[in-house]
Image: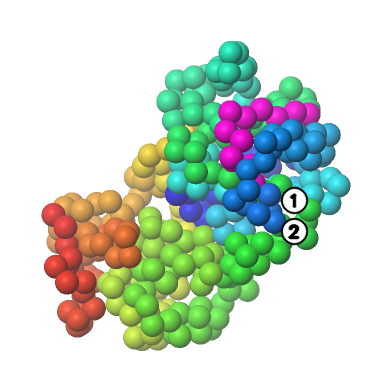
Amino acid sequence: MPELPEVQATVDGLKRRIIGRRIQNIWTDWPKIIKDPLNQRRVRRDQVARARKFLKGEKILGLRRRGKNILVSLSGNKIMLIHQKMSGHLLVGKWRVKNKKVIPMAPPIMKTDPWNGHIRFLFYLSGDLMVAFSDLRRFGKIVLGLKKEIENLTEIKNLGPEPLAKKFTFPKFRKIISKQKRKIKPVLMDPYVIAGIGNIYSDDMLWQSKIHPLKPANTLKDKELKALYTAMKSVLQKAKKLKGTSKGDYRTPAGREGKYADSRLVYQREGESCKRCGTKIKRTKLAGRSAHFCPKCQRLESRKHLPAGRESRK
């Protein structure tokens, strides 16, 4: 799933191309992608027609990221929330729909990269430009509503602080983390604790700060918390600069891969040598997700925190 750096790269890439344009029309072969903010499980027969009426003619006033959500501000006091979920990404270019098949026209990378070919939704914009939502697994969603409706969604109003925000100081970070009794990795990945951190960057920031992913958050000492806070900022800043990680289907709006995959510290490096001490990286399962770590650099003082029989998977 795209995390903070990938979503921010998407927002930055779209801002340069689409702010100020009007939405002229839409197309989709997956009506379920469209959600009603008051009942996201409801699927109406006229789902696409309602979305077209809501969006057509509205001007794109701004884009911003909140956690892993993209919020598109529209004229008419409307907001479009887009969540790319597991395999979705937004692209800027030109496509043609013929016999219900989406044919890429430009730029060339939309034709040559297969990950850019799973188009589920098209926005036709003024100035002869289009935005496409490519989503292999069909998990992504577009929520359409008035500003107040979208901002009051639980998934928005209950999000934790933004990890790269200047006002998210170390004292605030320490206060939030220290009261959590859960293992530190799922705490970092909980969007209602801190927004936007996922599997990739939680692994890397824990390695950089020499903290085992299974260590309970409320047992971290002040020195460890300071190291983790610094690692959180530096890892996310670097990933943001490199436009995220493309280990699978994520692409920038230009259709290109993010470059952080070459800079990964520990994520998906099981069996490879630790960049700090040379020990083989291990992987363990935690709450249904993988956690990668160096058993020497990231020691766990007490083995009682390890899940039975799951210290590592070779």
User: What is the three-letter code of the residue carrying label 1?
Assistant: Gly
Residue 92 figure quarter: top right
Look at the numbered disc 1 and give the secondary structure of its residue. Answer: strand
Expressed as whole percent of the image width and height from the top left, the position of residue 213 reads: 30, 70
Residue 277 appears in view: no
Determine whether, in the image, residue 271 is placed left or right of residue 44: left
269 or 265, which lies in front?
269
Image quadrant in which the C terminus is located: bottom left
Q: In the rendered structure, find residue 149 and report the number of the disc placed on it.
A: 2
Q: Residue furthest top?
A: 99
**Residues at badges 1 and 2 in contact (C-beta under 8 Å)?**
yes
Determine whether, in the image, residue 94 is placed left or right of residue 101: right
User: What is the three-letter code of the residue carrying label 2?
Assistant: Glu
Expressed as whole percent of the image width and height from the top left, the position of residue 189 reads: 43, 65
> In the rendered image, which residue does mark 1 sit on?
145
Residue at (45%, 46%) from the top-left corner?
86
Expressed as whole percent of the image width and height from the top left, the position of residue 81 reads: 66, 49
Residue at (41%, 41%) from the top-left corner?
246
